Image (spheres, rainbow, N blue to C red):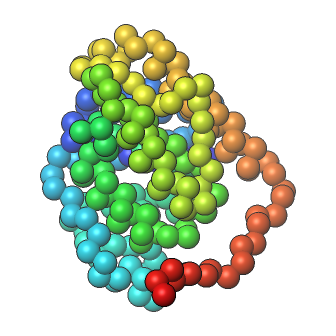
Amino acid sequence: MKVILLNGSPRAAGCTFTGLNIIKEQLAENGVDSQIYQVGNKPVIGCTACMTCKQPGKGGQCAFNDDMVNTVAKALDDADGFIVGSAVHFASATGAVTSFLDRLFYCRFGMNKLKFGACIVSARRSGTTATFDQLNKYFTISQMPIVSSCYWNGIHGYTPQDVYADEEGVRTLKILADNMAYLIKCKHQSNVELPQEPPRVATNFIR
């Protein structure tokens, strides 16, 4: 049982990382392994619609190899869950993590089905719920059940130390980790057959 954690903040050890690390520790308490990947502070190119990832034999790999997208894509093959963390920039996810996720989810389209997804967002003050909504859309279009907590998964603070002072936020993240672990264990113990979906239909609304 494993969960992939993605730090979408340019700061490798900032508030977003601190929140993800709280989740990582709580997952470990539940016997679930996890690993944090850093988007980093270098520019991340967005999807260029080159369609290379759709060519036979590409196996969900992006044409660009100068960042962590393909590393995370490969790690998701054997993962049960995926949690994305982002700082809030102008009431949105960071530009780097948005470009990262655009490429990751496009090259793996259909491959994340029924893996559990969740996101956490970090801000000094506000913009968390708008960012929370933005990130969850990656999961809903990918048939990934979203794991919830007792509140929207936002933490507040200007420094990592501030995050720990946000006791309600810390509690929210721990409950999220507990719920993720519980659902993963339920899935592993279930013998229910996975649902079969009908053939894809792309309706063209232009007449």
**Residue 48, percent across and down?**
26, 74
**Residue 103, percent across and down?**
35, 66
Q: Is residue 26 visible?
A: no
Q: Where 85 falls versus 103 (above or below)?
A: above
Q: Is residue 97 left or right of residue 132?
A: left
Q: Residue at x 73, y 49 (%)?
A: 187
Q: Is residue 162 left or right of residue 178?
A: left
Q: Residue farthest to the front?
A: 207
Q: Where 54 falls versus 131 (above or below)?
A: below
Q: Residue at x 49, y 48 (%)?
A: 136
Residue 197: name its quadrant: bottom right
Closer-to-camera residue (68/47): 47
Q: Is residue 43 visible?
A: yes
Residue 167: name its quadrant: top left
**Residue 44, percent across and down?**
21, 58
**Residue 177, percent across and down?**
56, 32
Q: Residue at x 55, y 68 (%)?
A: 111
Closer-to-camera residue (16/99): 99
Q: Residue at x 21, y 41 (%)?
A: 10
Residue 129: name its quadrant: top left
